[in-house]
Image: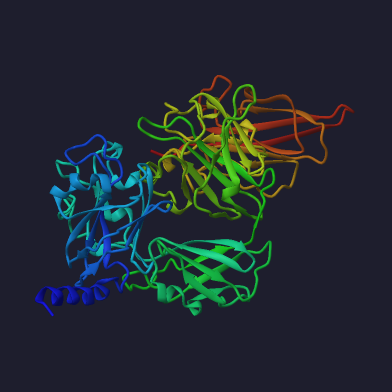
Amino acid sequence: MSQKACVFCFFCFLLPILSSAQNRYDVIINEFLPDPTPSRGLPESEFIEVKNRSPRDFNLRNWKISNGTTTGTIKTDYVLKSDSFLILCASASASSFSPFGSTIGVSGFPALINDGGEISISSDLGEVIHAIKYDKSWFKNDLKAEGGWSLEMIDPSKFCLGKENWSASVSDSGGTPGHINSVDAINPDKEMLALSRAVVTDSVNLNLLFNEPVDSASGANNFNYFISDGVGNPDSAFTTAPFFDQVSIKLQNPISAGKIYTISLQQVEDCKGEEIGLNNICKLGLPKKAKAGDIIFNEILFNPPPYGYDYLELFNRSSSVIRCSELFVAGINADGSLNTPTALVKDERDFFPGEYLLLTENPSWVLQNYPEADSSQILSISSLPSMPDDIGKVAILNSEGFILDELDYDHHWQSPLLTTESGVALERIDPDLPTSLASNWTSAAASAGYGTPSYKNSESYTDSVFTHFISIDPKIFSPDMDGYNDFCYINYHLSQSGYMGSISIYDINGRMVRRLVNNEIWATEGIFRWDGLDDQQNLLPMGHYMIYTELFLLDGSVKKNLSVCVLARKAH
């Protein structure tokens, strides 16, 4: 046999050994260019750079690259050596990228979505080796996100990290295909594996969502999961490709409608073998269709500060778990027509009783400006309804187009004590009173940063115990917008409808200083608030004030009440 034939036979013998990776993440996606226009110096074409971070070499024939919809296949033999890079691109662009480093033109190379999408690489055996799900926020630079700059992994040893381990290239040419990344650095993993939420499919099936990829073996151990209220360990569990940040659970014992359960985890590990941290428990329950009034508007920022963003906060005041994919938000025009509704979510999640959900186009801005905001309760929405700075109308709808709640807001609902309305959110005072009631809305407190997105309102109110048809609370209030007893609330509960009434405020000398309500028809229950101002919207001095209420029916029946409150000031 000739020497040439021996070499050929040896290579043929070697190819199966090199054919596929034995471990996930042996080969990783290290850089990619989703939007090549305008070019900074790179070819004006998309590319994906992969890196072999293992000590082994791999033949990439029949490996696949996918965007979740389209899949391209490497049709030629190519040995990707240990600690080396390879540029993958469309076949027509291979000659343009080859001067930058080793390049393969892939038949059917999948298009990369500019605004955000997914990329996965799989071995010839169909095993997912690495997958990422990206969006524009990964650039951490709004200008570079508009095109011409690649996204580079910061620390290749932290391949499980998402956004935290990616950044826009800082190379003058816009990227570093075939070379060490321009942003290459040690990037400590500051976040432990955490259970984000559970989504129930039916009475025996649910999906668990994590903040990062899960180790397949520990994720598939059904004894690592326990459901409360007698449900116990599930029948089975398995991690879901291609991102492995979800675990599908099948229960032995079904859960019941109308009941909230908890699922707790132990010994589940991330892709680096580190065990889950303290965030290892979450709620779950069978969802129901939302009815009118189940989901309500609870807070709105329609006049944000310069360079800020609008937001809408929802509150689930029902006793039911509501599926977010069945909720939509829309603006309402002056003629009553609806604008095109926007879905709340792309990825399914449940909305539990007593929870808040914040809708915004820029969660990062909210988290930077409101430190108390709960990131897990913030939804990034593609487009909020238009919300003018003076008046507007927005609605929440279900999947059938029925309105669940609508808010006809007015900037006059803001506190007269404000020096500016810019950057001040309107908060709902009582979730059980009508959304349309102007007196049920007020400005967020200064002490709360003029907004409480995704958590309890600074000016929220809980009914006091009634000993009469009128209840005053608090007895001492200080209208200084610090979020503590800023208003005097006048609550009422009536035994029948049809009453018409007035509320007047008198000072200690018996002079009327404020006509708060003037001969209006009252509901059977409700709330009014006094802000400490007189009829000319001037702040009244400290002291005792009398609140006189008079109600009457058409049959001549009359109800009267006189209560006393104290307007106080903080000591300086």
Mark count: 0
Q: Residue furthest top?
A: 536
State whether residue 523 is above or below residue 210. Answer: above
Q: Residue furthest front?
A: 1
Along the line of sight, which residue is nearer the eye, 436 or 118?
A: 118
Quadrant of the image occupied by residue 236: bottom right
State whether residue 212 is above or below residue 474. Answer: below
Q: Name the residue located 50 percent from the left edge and 71 percent from the top edge.
A: 264
User: Is 393 situated left or right of 358 in this image?
Assistant: right
Q: Residue furthest left?
A: 3
Q: Is residue 475 visible?
A: no
Image quarter (top left, top right, bottom left or bottom right) of the C terminus: top left
Q: Could you say where residue 45 lies in the image, as x and y percent from the top left?
A: 26, 42
Quadrant of the image occupied by residue 125: bottom left
Q: Name the residue located 56 percent from the left edge and 68 percent from the top edge.
A: 262
Along the line of sight, which residue is nearer the eye, 450 or 311?
A: 311
State whether residue 319 is above or below residue 451. Answer: below
Colour mapping: rainbow
Q: Name the residue located 27 percent from the left edge and 68 percent from the top edge.
A: 26
User: Is 93 situated left or right of 479 in this image?
Assistant: left
User: Is 363 situated left or right of 346 in this image?
Assistant: left
Image quarter (top left, top right, bottom left or bottom right) of the N terminus: bottom left
Q: Could you say where residue 330 lies in the image, as x and y percent from the top left?
A: 57, 34
Q: Could you say where residue 387 lies in the image, as x and y percent from the top left?
A: 50, 29
Q: Could you say where residue 214 lies in the image, as x and y percent from the top left?
A: 39, 68
Q: Is residue 244 visible?
A: yes
